[in-house]
Image (tube, rainbow, N blue to C red):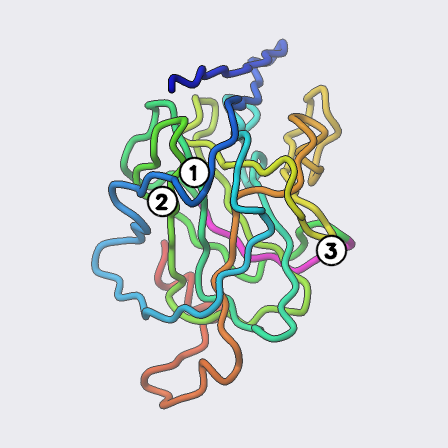
Amino acid sequence: MNLAIFIMIVFSSRSIAETRIDSARIPAAAREQALCTGVIKPGIKVPALRGETLGNHDGTFENAYAWAYAGVAAPDFGAFAESYEAPAAPFATGITLYLSQIGNYACGPQMELYCWEDDGGRPGNAIVCLSGMDPGSPAEWPGISEHNIPFPGPIPVPMLFWIGYWGSWIDDIPRFFIAADLDGPGSIKGPRTKIAENLEYPSGWQNPSLVWDPTQSLGICVQTLSTASVSGPAEKIKLATWGGFKSLYK
């Protein structure tokens, strides 16, 4: 069955664009796998620590979003985030993204991964930021691929935290789109996107429903471990720190 691809690009006087892909419902269970998944950086050994993966979607995605051109600006305008509560799994060990593309993906550093504290219902101070990341080649729409990117070590997270990414294609077309669930359970805080200044929308962290369709959640999941899971010999388990991450990713 041929599914039409529709990309909406809205330009302002400053060539700012928000983009989306519309199609029929795409089951996550039937998604294509990425050609290469979880590319971090050559020469960096990543521990294979992974427990439960938490997600706010219902297993299907009906759309996919991205910011483009001047909608993407430093330091993190154009970012996307999902909120999570972790009472039984206080360590984040990686991120799982559900992505799609329309043929513009190119290998190489093109995203930053974030874990944030909560600040009154929106992402606040960064717990960690990993720059120069490559998620691997996403499936082409209408396919949606799963990308599992482990952190160099388990990150202690508060009871309520946010996890997400910023695509670093400043003043350019989007390299990939984040999948969107329009009718799933969602989360208490809902998804967020950081809107650049001088657009037709309020700037800062806002619900993506303000820009695109009413959205319950995004394809941004977090890999977690419980305290018991990370207990063990010190030479095998090392808690990640901000300073440690900065020394690995420059």
Q: For this rendering, which residue is in front, 166 or 162?
A: 162
Q: Local crowd at mark 2 within 10 Å, few (<14), some, or many (≥20)?
A: many
Marks 2 and 3 sit apart, C-alpha to C-alpha, by: 27 Å
- CB within 8 Å, label 1 to label 2: yes
Location of residue 53 in the rendering, given as x and y in whole percent from the top left corner = 49, 61
Residue drawn at x 36%, y 90% is 233
Q: Nearer the viewer, mark 3 or mark 1?
A: 1
Mark 2, residue position: 135
Q: Please say whether residue 114 is one of the residues in the magenta stretch.
A: yes
Q: Amino acid at mark 2?
A: Pro
Residue 32, by quadrant, is: top left
Q: Is residue 109 left or right of residue 206?
A: left
Residue drawn at x 56%, y 13% is 15
Instruction: Tell me the quadrant of the picture where the C terminus can be found.
Output: bottom left
Marks 1 and 2 sit apart, C-alpha to C-alpha, by: 9 Å
Q: Please say whether residue 89 is one of the residues in the magenta stretch.
A: no
Mark 3, residue position: 119
Q: Look at the numbered disc 1 and give the secondary structure of its residue.
A: strand
Above or below, comparing residue 132 to residue 168 in the picture: below
Location of residue 152 in the rendering, given as x and y in whole percent from the top left corner = 37, 66
Give whichever of discs 1 and 2 has the lower sequence position. Answer: 1
Q: Local crowd at mark 1 within 10 Å, few (<14), some, or many (≥20)?
A: many
Question: Magenta stretch mostly in which secondary structure?
Answer: strand
